[in-house]
Amino acid sequence: MTRKNSNSSSILPEDDSNDPSHIVRVGKSATLDVGTVGNDRASFREAMDPANQSLGEALRLSYRLLQLAIAGLVLTFFVSGFQSIPEGVTGVRTIFGQVAGDSGSEIVAPGLQPFWPYPIGEFKTMQQRQSIDVRDAFWPQRAQKDVTLEAATEAASSSEPIRPGRDGSVITADGDLAHLQLTVDYSIVDPVAMLTQISSERTDALVRSVLGRAVVQTAAVYTLTELLEQRETPAQDIRQRMQTYLDDLQIGIQIGTVAILERTAPLAVRAAYQRVQTAREDMKTKLERARQEASVELVGAAGPNYLVILEMIQQYELLLTAGDIAASDDLLRKIGQRFEQPDIGGQASHIIMQAQAFQSNLVATLSKETRQLMSLAQSYKDNPKQLVQQLWLDAVRKSISQNEVEVFSVPNELNHYVIRVKSSPEIMQMRRDADLTRKKMAAAMLGGNLPSFELGSRQIMIDKPGRRLDESGDKGFGR
């Protein structure tokens, strides 16, 4: 290839005058002549090969980068469907808004869950356990502003009535008003049923509505005293009613616990009501103390099985009051027999044991004296004076042989004189000890002032009723 260049410029004057207006200027010009040597096409291809190669390599690199970018985007799109479900969270998978999965397996489990990416697929999740506090719905507005319930009570006045729509309250079975604050824990046990009925954002509102209905209906079956004093039963009834309503809706919500945080009578009467409650609690305490003391007394009187004896005594009093003497006497004998059973303890058992021991001792003593009299009967028949004299001497000998007896011998010549004799200190002390011992034995013996062989003889009546346990005290020995 050859190039030929020409470049010329000339000025042709028309005359010899120096007038520049007569000068004609001719511009530059260039002519490019391209010549070829040999094969023109081959030469051109040879000249363009380096540029084509550079452009092709650039295009191939750009295409590969574009392929990698598209592959990365596709991979990122599919990987975006993976989602990690934390513990305590439940939910379902949806494809184009419809719940996906076989029946019974729609609920997602905690952990990494693969699924179609959005907008094809989506995870709809929510907290499995939730709780709500209801502090204003059934509570007076004024009390909400005060720091404590006591401060609200002091600030309350009977001239400021409870206004519906402003102050929350419930009506009890006896027509009184009460205020409550509650908290409720619930669980989503069937998210499929819940999400097909309502959205997860409306769950709390639904539970609050069901709680309000259950509280109003439950309070209507309790009196004010019962609602305030029974700590667990009202909350359990509220929970049961809430669960019944939710089961009817088939909403997939399970109520866990219902707790009544605060409960009170209307603030204007709360102080007076508290005084009544305090007096009632004091009465219960005193009544319980009296029952315990009565139980201790009865156990000490007849042992742990005193209720059996007490019931028989009550029946005996009813028969006696009705005038049925024959039946009352028969029951009295049965009461005596029941007292002798081995399961009866306390003072009754102790007295019966003393009586049985005294009876045995009395029988033994009488038997001994009977045998002695039988042995002396023949001697008395043969010589009664001699036997009497002998027995008198034996009695004198027994009397003077005792330790506290002191014997003085005085000659007959002094029988006309008055002699004052003072016992020895040892004998006097011995007499005092013996007298004290006898008094202790008499005090320990039931009816110690009675003859020992007639225990309780003052209560024995001939041909008329003896001791009676009539409470009125107008019949029998005790009147």
Image (cartoon, rainbow, N blue to C red):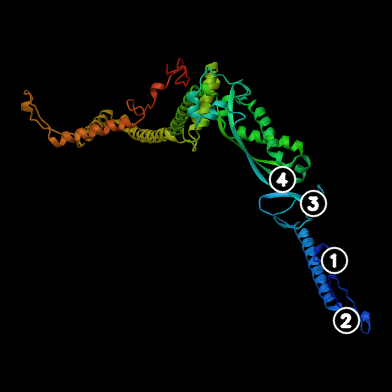
> Which badge, 4 or 3, comes first in the chain's sequence?
3
Residue for badge 4: 189
Snapshot quadrant of residue 114: bottom right
Identify residue type, mark 3. Answer: Pro
- Expressed as whole percent of the image width and height from the top left, the position of residue 221 reads 64, 26
- Asked if marks 1 and 4 touch (Cβ < 8 Å), the reply is no
Please tell me which residue is depicted at 45% across the width and 36% down the height of the picture: 345
> Which badge, 2 or 4, comes first in the chain's sequence?
2
> Which badge, 1 or 2, comes first in the chain's sequence?
2
- CA gap between label 4 and label 3 equals 27 Å
- CA gap between label 2 and label 4 equals 92 Å
Identify residue type, mark 1. Answer: Val
Name the side, left or right, on which 35 lies relative to 58.
right
- CA gap between label 1 and label 2 equals 33 Å
Name the side, left or right, on which 271 lies relative to 256.
left
Please tell me which residue is depicted at 44% across the width and 21% down the height of the picture: 467
Identify residue type, mark 2. Answer: Thr
Identify residue type, mark 4. Answer: Val
Toward the viewer: 81 or 182? Answer: 81
Q: Is residue 304 above or below residue 224?
A: below
> Which badge, 1 or 3, comes first in the chain's sequence?
1
Residue for badge 1: 24
- The residue sitting at the bottom extreme is 38
Residue for badge 2: 2
